[in-house]
Amino acid sequence: MTLAVSMRDVSIRHAAARNVTPSVREATLAIRQGEIFGLVGPSGCGKSTLLRVLAGLNGYWDGAIELLSQPLSPGVPLTGALRHAVQMVFQDPYASLHPRHTIGRALDEPLRLMGERDTASGLDEVMRLVGLDPRLLAHYPHQLSGGQRQRVAIARALLTRPRLLLLDEPTSALDKSVQAGILNLLNRLRAQFGMTLVLVSHDADVIAHLCDRAALMRAGRLGPALDREALVRALTNPERETGNE
Amino acid sequence: MTDSSYSLADGAPPPAWRAGRPRRLTPVLWLGVAILALLLAVALFAPWLAPSDPDGQQLTLRLLPPSSAHPFGTDGLGRDVLSRVLFGTRPTLLLISLVLLLTVPVGLTVGIAAGMAGGWIETILMRLTDMVLALPKLVLALAIIAVLGPGLLKGALALALTAWPVYARQARAETLVLRHSDYLAAARMQGIHGVRLCFGHVLPMCLPTTVVRATLDLGGMILAAAGLGFLGLGVPPPTAEWGSMVADGSAVIFDQWWVAMAPGGAILLASLAFNLLGDGLRDWLDPRHE
Amino acid sequence: MNEPMPTLPLIVERLTVRAAQGALVDGISFCHEGGLVALVGESGSGKTMTARALLGLTPRGCRVEAQRLLFRGQDLLAATPADWRHLRGRHIGLVQQDPRYALNPVKTVAWQVEEGLRLHHRHLGRRERRERVEAMLTAVGLTPNRRLLNAYPHHLSGGMGQRVMLAASLISEPALLIADEPTSALDEALRRQALDLIASLAEARGMAVLLISHDLPLVAHYCRQALVMRHGALLETLPAGELAHARHPYTQMLWRCQPSAATYGQQLPVWEEDAP
């Protein structure tokens, strides 16, 4: 089976500072294609930092990373086919959409960059794919609810037909009832397109609901990948309830 | 529960909003636009509006107080002040549009480029900005005019050369805040970068404050242009220009106040128009403003 | 709280908050009989606006109407701005969602916790105030050493910030605490801790708590009564323990949309909104 993500001894430092202790230390991980993989841990444990490295948004790391069998180098943003194959959905749908671009503008630009001339049908299609009314294309983000915005963010990530979708706490800013709809959507997208999903969350219930496998992370240390059974056991372990201040 | 694989549960547009509805102009913006339109109309139709030749000297009619024949009186050379104020709209508006066209794009480009690029590019651009910012405005303008010689275009250039750094500083400060925002990261994920990212994504966020800043500065620009005119370095005489008219009138301000009063009032009106415009535009540019 | 309360902490009858675009809260009625009562609903259901009305903090352009709005027998509808200033902080406390925004970033922990005393207990001396601050911080499970007292909000972790916020709102011993999503900025593990704390403090002080939350399992675990809101109206009122067996399909959906290990691979229920 081919791997979607393969990491060996990846350490991540904050920004350019050389002598700070790394925020993630020697993370080693293999994520298979087509699975939903979870990264669980309390806030500040470095899981989002790790995800941003995979997205090519943070170049301050060393070690070895391969995405979809292509090696990455530190400090080099993703380009070409890999750029299209790897997409990300951010935590806060209020902050990840440009406040002065209509939804249509936000979704149209990536399509045009990929060389599509007639984007109208593509926009309609992707809106319906994430369960949104295409009429919303003419609206601004602030006119939409949190759930709608997160659907738009997912739609934007789907435009390039990614094979690896990175999700940074995609539902933690949303109501539970809205979260349910987004989780359903993610499950459906995986089934429909056979994408690999990497989900970062502090919510054990969301991870347990969605993920085929997961790894626990604490204070910059990434644990081993757990299969379904081990993961449920680890997440329902009462020991995890103890505070971490 | 019903099948939710394709539900519009979350997807229907909020009924209260109709998309594409043109945003309504606020009264403040209206007033600003109205005054500016008036000024533009005056500039365009000055030859038809002016009761007499702005440069026509009649030394027998020196310093006449306002009357029905000369509503704003006459100046020291017997020229009709009303006509001169009307004609003076032209060089003044031309000058500030030139200054605007020269400063705002330069300032924004430098600021956004510095903010987005970071590293040594930022250092060089910002030190350059600081250098220009450190020079006293009017002195530098005087020096430039001394080299280039007086004239409308040269005056605008002189003012613009010292006016862009504030826009650069402000744009950079705003860009720095945006640089790590999620929506720019999201745009990068879509392969949007470079000029496209700067002008399509960062610029719209910097524009409102720049517009406000520019319109607030315009009042100052008019005064600075008037200052140059006052020193005899702006538009060469006898062309009617508000600044030089105020300068002429200030010699006789205690006895023949109308000579300075009329162009002064015009400067006030123009500054007011731009201030109102700036205030209104800021609200109007923000799509969240309801 | 030495003598029994002559009246209930809160009586709300047909409370309506009207804004230009319509009613944000639409004629809700309930009695708060003490203990923990929860106001649940999705965002936009009007639960936060209800809390704001109870604090006299509705935004400009909103009109608050009610048949009766009584806080311990005092008519809140007739409260003047001066009355509100006296009520807020002194008698009605507020804990907000996110300590990162609710705490003043340029003031120390000690200063922020003490503020309630400086405002509402002017007779206290400096030493007495400091003692109360330390006692309060201990009560919320923090160690009031010099380091904590002189810390600024950015030094604190999310859970500690939450505790400081709680201490600041409890210091003047309010009779009613309004907690607006006090745990949604916290990690799973810290949520229970924070609510354990609120529940035990409420019991120890005989304080009534109005908890605003969209987390139904949490509400069911800690609260006595749950008020379910939707579109500004009160959908149903039920004992919080029975949330799992609610009658109304909307409440059922709210309860069952909670993901867990048991729902792996299944569709979660979502509410089908009426077509617009």
Image (cartoon, rainbow, N blue to C red):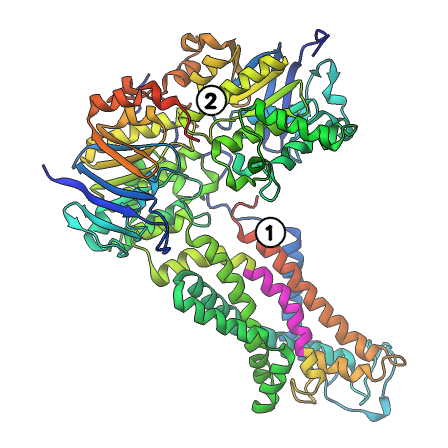
Q: Residue at x 67, y 63 (%)?
A: B273
Tag nearer the camera, 2 or 1: 2
Mark 2 neighbour class, 10 Å CA radius: few under 14, some 14 to 19, many 20 or more: some
- The magenta-colored residue range is B210-225
Q: Report the residue marked by disc 2.
A: C193
The quadrant holding residue B275 is bottom right
Label 1 packing within 10 angstroms: few (<14), some (14-19), many (20+): some
Looking at the picture, how far across and down is residue A13, in whole percent?
33, 49
Q: Dot 1 falls on which chain?
A: B
Q: Position of residue C57 (x, y in %)?
A: 66, 30
Q: Position of residue A112 (x, y in %)?
A: 29, 54
Vertical order, C237 against B192 (above or below): above
Check the image and report above or below for A189 versus C233: below
Q: Residue furthest left?
A: A1
Instruction: Check disc 1 and give the amino acid type.
Output: Leu
Helix, strand or loop status at disc 1: loop
| Same chain? Circles 2 and 1 | no
Residue at mark 1: B25
In which quadrant of the rendered image does the C terminus of chain C lie? Answer: top left
